Amino acid sequence: MTDQLADLTAQSTNFAMPDLRPLLAPRAIAVVGASDRPGAGSLVLENLRRLDFAGAVYPVNPKYTELHGWRCYPSLRDLPGPVDCVAILLGYQRVLPALQEAAAVGARAAWALASGFGEAGPAGEKLQAEAAAFCRANDIALVGPNCIGVVNLHARAAAYSVALPPTIQPGRVAAVVQSGAVCLGIANANRGLGFSALISSGNEAVLENADYIAWLADDPQTAVIIAFIEGFKNPARFVWAARRAAAAGKPLLVVKVGRSAVAQRAALAHTGSLAGADAVHDAVFRELGVVRLNTLDELLEAAELFLKAPLPKGRGTAILTLSGGQIGLIGDLLEGDAHRWGADLRLAELSSAGRQALAAILPPYSAIANPLDAWGSGDFEATYPACLEVLAREPDVDVIAVSRDSPPGIAEREIAQSNVVVDAAARVAAASGKTVAVFANVSTGIEPRVKARADAVGLPLLQGTRESLAAIAGLIRYAEFRAQLAERGRALFAEPAASPVSADRLAALKRELAASSHSLTESQGKRLLAAYGIRAPQEALASSADEAARLAAALGRPVALKIASPDILHKTEAQGVLLNITGAEAVRDGYQRIVQSARRHSPQARIDGVLVQEMAPAEAVEVIVGATVDPQFGPVVVFGMGGILVELLHDAVLRLAPVSLASAMEMIAATRAGRLLTGFRGRPPADIAALADAIVRISYLAHDLRHEVAAVDVNPLMALPAGQGVMAVDALVVRR
Amino acid sequence: MTDQLADLTAQSTNFAMPDLRPLLAPRAIAVVGASDRPGAGSLVLENLRRLDFAGAVYPVNPKYTELHGWRCYPSLRDLPGPVDCVAILLGYQRVLPALQEAAAVGARAAWALASGFGEAGPAGEKLQAEAAAFCRANDIALVGPNCIGVVNLHARAAAYSVALPPTIQPGRVAAVVQSGAVCLGIANANRGLGFSALISSGNEAVLENADYIAWLADDPQTAVIIAFIEGFKNPARFVWAARRAAAAGKPLLVVKVGRSAVAQRAALAHTGSLAGADAVHDAVFRELGVVRLNTLDELLEAAELFLKAPLPKGRGTAILTLSGGQIGLIGDLLEGDAHRWGADLRLAELSSAGRQALAAILPPYSAIANPLDAWGSGDFEATYPACLEVLAREPDVDVIAVSRDSPPGIAEREIAQSNVVVDAAARVAAASGKTVAVFANVSTGIEPRVKARADAVGLPLLQGTRESLAAIAGLIRYAEFRAQLAERGRALFAEPAASPVSADRLAALKRELAASSHSLTESQGKRLLAAYGIRAPQEALASSADEAARLAAALGRPVALKIASPDILHKTEAQGVLLNITGAEAVRDGYQRIVQSARRHSPQARIDGVLVQEMAPAEAVEVIVGATVDPQFGPVVVFGMGGILVELLHDAVLRLAPVSLASAMEMIAATRAGRLLTGFRGRPPADIAALADAIVRISYLAHDLRHEVAAVDVNPLMALPAGQGVMAVDALVVRR
């Protein structure tokens, strides 16, 4: 974890775990606005009846004396006993009065269904702020408003306004979903996942997704937390919650939406627009071990896999299929989504012993490869199990994905075959301890008898080629995070930061910045970079040809010679520039020619001499290193390919600042620019070590000066050939 | 359609429609290798029994006298009557003898299950070639080998070796699937699509996917053709079949796999590797109106949509949702897959009258936008239908996508609500004639009663946010293809080609090329381009300072001055180059200085004078235009951003050559380079008309000389500011 994240997590001492028992395990629930008419007023009671809630249920509505078999009370003040949780089903104008009554009768939790609050303009925002302030002052854990409530399937408790599906089962997946309709989609999905809790968090006036996540991290009934997040009320609190989940060993799987809008919102400077807040989220998630997915389908498949599969020891993945067509499908998806999965899911190399063993199982004409087509001569009930045994013994295989479609409605014979595959996969998984999953290439549900067979032995059954691959890549990424966590322990969350500048020097830089204008001049920017150890091209004024030659020799590189005269603005027109000059003789000669040309061009000009400027060799590669300050997560550093097209190309990678040298090396390797730097088309390899060091230094600059500097843009930074370092040709620094 | 495609389609006169009635509507079927043991030998008979096939069934196996209630015969020669189709379930060595027997008894169709043929090395290839030659000579339509056979659900006929699902229904979707396992996946998918035919084409020794597609285009029972294609045996034949489908008004939806492998195979020259055969497939599919999808899930959802929805009149799409969370999910997917869908699916603009009408339906705090959150205050049974009515009246709305999840197992109340949505969507679709689809954000099947309700009125119900959007984008693209087809009629398939060079001149160019070596020199390449009207920078030799100034003035641009001497190879070292010189005085002066420098550097050198060379102004943009010859589909032209990183960046677009001016303009607009050309970061807009003209000319060069030239690479082509044309700075031409 970077120092910046450590900064955020340092605040975690300020965060107390909310007590959600009154909400999620209440002894008594009151339902204000209960009704017998179709709608929320009735459904909340129906859900409690369906769950067979063991506590007291108090419908509240002056119009009724009884509802769904429970006695109905005219107001909260009339209840016969204490109440933990109050469900408020009234319109938005009546929510605050209801909360006041709830506080008066000692309730510690409440849920407000109504919309018309924070999402509805200034008047709604004011109402929401009042309700939130009241709940905070009176220690009420408020869900919503503007959401469909919560369910705890183990406690059989619910304050939930939509009809629960009859098929829903208690289990070990907890869902925290900001959107009501998406919560409903997940609750209703019929994907065979049992749930511990379903929470729609809505406007998050008081309780935010971080509170639920942190509480669920401690909940013994929950093994996997899935979340659908639209925004973070309080990023530091999310970091705290994600850390608690990591510490508890509970995977946190997230769909985070809002890319498009959020990206438009964040446009600080050049690299600001490159970065985009969404890339910051990616970086934060990666560092916290939060697994990001893109659709609800991917989220559900990942939940199935994370719930059941052991964590793999490495990235090597073997894929067993029934045809070359399936291999084509898988191969194309792996390549197409390589930018997301490629680094995580690696097709395992088969050993020659393994290849021979597979060849012995399959017909002589079979291609032995990974992914493997094990259709054989149609006798895959024999070949599949045998091939699975071989693959599980392969040293480079950490994960085995087994392609087999078993949608509902298939023939008995197909069910029997699927069960052969399930049994073999389960057997191999148990014997090898490796990660084994069976996946279908169509997403139309799973035949119940096949599903039951797999569930009985805890074998994950996935659906959808794309979704299955995304889930597996996510599991591998998470396993690597856990391995790092185990290895580095707490250090992962508090890597010591060491700025390249001293505290005194930093204080001086801050004073200088305080005095400067909105954008620093190029030379001011370069001085700031120099303070962080990033050098600009060297230059010096020569007042004679001999001095120019001496200076050039000292630089030890090709030089540019430029006429130095306060009266000549357009040096090129005055023939006052020569590029790429090497050798003492040529420099001396160039000096003379430039001075002569300038005199001819402007006979009256004062001439101070000739500027001798270090030039990057032709083999240098232009890259960009930038930094910006994310409004939520703080300073970030960006690395990408240089040149003026940088905004267009999106070949950039971003990390929270500051970064370690190892992270900087990873950033370089993750870009296409990185490929270029290792030597491409006859170019020599660039000084990658020096480039990584420069990224670290610029990341510290962004971190140290995060209150003073909004954006840094070193473009281009010339990466010189190996051993020669880097050179900042231009630098833009924007003040906050 | 381009001329090249017209070339391919011109061959269509050579293609005869195969007679697939003996295969797909046989009067009698013989099953050689029938058996009572579990496996194909039994399953083929079980399938015929299940379908209640009305024709004669002849099991053939000397070991049995009766199988599954049918009399069994020792050999084909013993059958009591004529047979149309012979299913051959024997091992690969015994297939040819069985075909010979089949021919002897007058069968006109056969299917071979066995693998071990063309996919299995030289021996298998030989066996397959013999079988194919025999079938062609004896007029036998052969399916496979190495596949699971065919089913015609209307004729209730099958030669199919896998147990058909009991749920399968006759319908109007035909599936042509090269891979057996994928065919099985589609047949078993339980997606509620009825099928006319299921065809696994396997190795395609005789019948290839094009034959089935063409036949199905004429089949009155088929409305939509879906195909899973691994490769084209005969691209011209595929073009012919796709044209027949287009002419018959039947959408052809395709998953084409093999991107990764195929891309490696095609690496001719610089642009060859850029192009990649897969991009050629994209281009061919787009021109033929073939809708390409990426997964089986996308294919199935597209089939559902194409089967039921009317074609939209335009791209304007309104999306009705139940939450901001769903909008975030949809928005992010639209942006994330913009490179595939962006140009097709456009979020419609709402009129101010429409906005007012929506505001009147929804609570006062609602955000009125597209996508629209119509959850209201939870009363969407009222708001959804009303909002749908408004959206259907909007002039910019051509398609309405309605978000509503209805997976199996939901509560009664949810079913009722889904049915309200289905009814309203169906009502609005019927009244407006617009394209309306309801889609779910989870892919776990559809509640049967909701599905039945939608099916009864022909309303498409889709599943999966991503898959639904992909299907809608495909429908819009296809509708545009149909509109063009209707407008231009046959012209679309035979756009008249007009090469910029005359037939005589072309013949002369071919003679010159025949005499040249593998790669043309730069000046030969530039001469070839000049013949096609693409100019290189002008240059001329000056033998005096005054002549240099005259020549520079005639060019009317900045010039480069370069020493012209057969004895000076390294001009720069000799200070023999000056760049960007303007003005007569500066040119004269430059001439003198260059000659002096050269004399000083090499006193013995012969000096011919100074080359005066036109330079592109600094505002010119470097682009690349290239061409290559796809081994299957012929010459293609590529346009992309220039510079040495061109291979890395993949910002390129490809079309079959030659292209029209309109296509060339589209190519430019489709790239990021195109954005740069319209003016970016203070650059002036480039001469896009001239650039498009150059693309057309280079595409004709590639087309005219497709037998002589393997690759053309104009890199960079400088696009000068508007009105100033283009300039080919370098040209690589590779002979075939």
Image: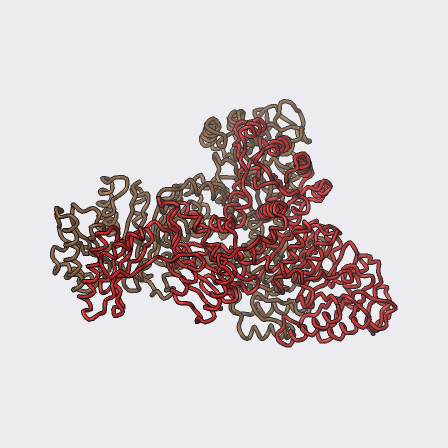
Chain colours: A red, B brown
Q: Nearer the viewer, residue B124 or A295?
A: A295
Residue placed furthest toward the right? A80
Residue B696, quarter of the rendered image? bottom left
Return the x and y of residue B714 as percentages of the image width and height.
Answer: 31, 51
Question: Which residue is located at x 54 percent, y 33 percent?
Answer: A350
Residue B559, quarter of the rendered image? bottom left
Badge count? 0
Whether residue B594 sits left or right of residue A730 in the image: it is left
Residue A369: tell me if it is visible.
Answer: yes
Give the answer, above or below, for where B356 lies relative to B517: below
Residue B728: tell me if it is visible.
Answer: no
Give the answer, above or below, for where A91 lies relative to B508: below
Q: Nearer the viewer, residue B338 or A279?
A: A279
Whether residue B526 sits left or right of residue B488 in the image: it is left
Whether residue B47 sits left or right of residue B145 in the image: it is right
Residue placed furthest toward the front? A504
Return the x and y of residue A515 as percentages of the image width and height.
Answer: 45, 71
Return the x and y of residue B215 as percentages of the image width and height.
Answer: 50, 44
Q: Nearer the viewer, residue B57 or A678?
A: A678
| Quarter of the picture holding the C terminus of chain B | top left
Whether residue A311 sits left or right of residue B510 in the image: it is right
